[in-house]
Amino acid sequence: MTNCGASGETCCASLEVQGGTYFRTYNYGSSPTAEADPATLSTFRLDKYLVTVGRFRRFVNAWNGGSGWTPVARAGKHVHLNGGAGLANSGAPGTYETGWVAPDDVNVAPTDVNLTATCEPYATWTPTAAGNENLPIICVDWFEAYAFCIWDGGFLPSEAEWEYAAAGGRQQRLYPWGAASPGTDNQHAIYGCFYPHISPCSGFTSIAPVGTATAGAGLWGQLDLAGDVWEWNLDWDSAYVDPCTDCAYLAAASNRINRGGYFSGDAASLVPSDRGSCTPEGRFTDIGFRCARTP
């Protein structure tokens, strides 16, 4: 909880991201080209680190206590936007975030079995605190990620917020840290099974403690925006809708967006504009999350 990254700081560190306008679609050569799908964002905060096993353990304890903690209805909205209405829903113009809905309570079930069985040998969760507390939590479904962020006083970042932070806003970087190659020394990103050394991936030991890739910080200081594990975003998977001002695609579809690449992926998955998506009920060996917050 208090010893993440090279300096051993709080794992709950959250850094401000200055708002602005950028392009969600772009190519990168010597500079951004073929720019399209602009988005304008207000200032927000985004956690410096992926949510760790240790942080998630506190949430599991709250869920296990008494009748089990679940979010209150309509929690988790970007209440600092649009007079408290939250993000604009680009999937249904004129509507906004609904926040948490009670029928989704049944999808929050962070049991020992659920957090390990489908993700072995990569599961980072252990039933009791052991040596994995600073690894990113994986094998959480989208609902548990969303519920954790609500419990922790924040919300899941929208796809536009996440990409904006990873791209360095209007700089629209090739990688979160800039144009330098990610290399194979685990300094910029954990990917390609290069961690802890060049070898085939072999279980959760191929997943690095959060903040290990110290040279990979984005413009506003967040780490692991490229590699280690994919990150759940708020949006449903859809083609971009223009224009977008503090928007998210919230009309129900099949999959939820995830971003950022992962420990065994290739360098192409590390670029901020790369998109992934998965069923929100799924538990995956390579998807974790981080939270966003009001500025």
Image: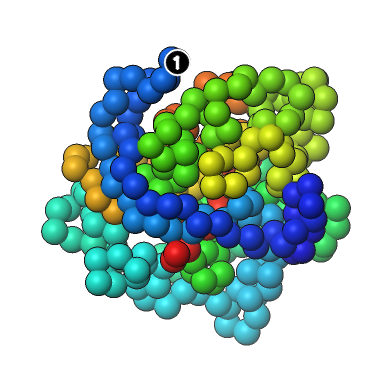
Relative depth, front residue between 179 and 85: 179
Q: Which residue is mark 1?
A: 30
Rendered residue at 58%/78% (across/down): 68
Whether residue 194 is situated above or below residue 277 in the rendered picture? above
Whether residue 178 is situated above or below residue 126 in the rendered picture? above
Query: Could you tell whether 248 is left or right of 210 in the image?
Result: left
| Mark 1 closeness class: few <14, some 14–19, many ≥20 residues within 10 Å | few
Residue 170 in view in this figure: yes
Q: Position of residue 50 (x, y in %)?
A: 62, 50
Q: Position of residue 174 (x, y in %)?
A: 49, 25
Rendered residue at 33%/19% (across/down): 33
Relative depth, front residue between 183 and 33: 33
Rendered residue at 18%/61% (across/down): 95
Whether residue 183 is situated above or below residue 40 in the rendered picture? above
Rendered residue at 37%/45% (across/down): 160
Query: Could you tell whether 264 is left or right of 269 in the image?
Result: right
Query: Could you tell whether 38 is left or right of 279 in the image?
Result: left
Indicate the colouring scheme: rainbow
The C terminus, quarter of image: bottom left
Q: Amino acid at mark 1?
A: Ser
Relative depth, front residue between 88 and 166: 166
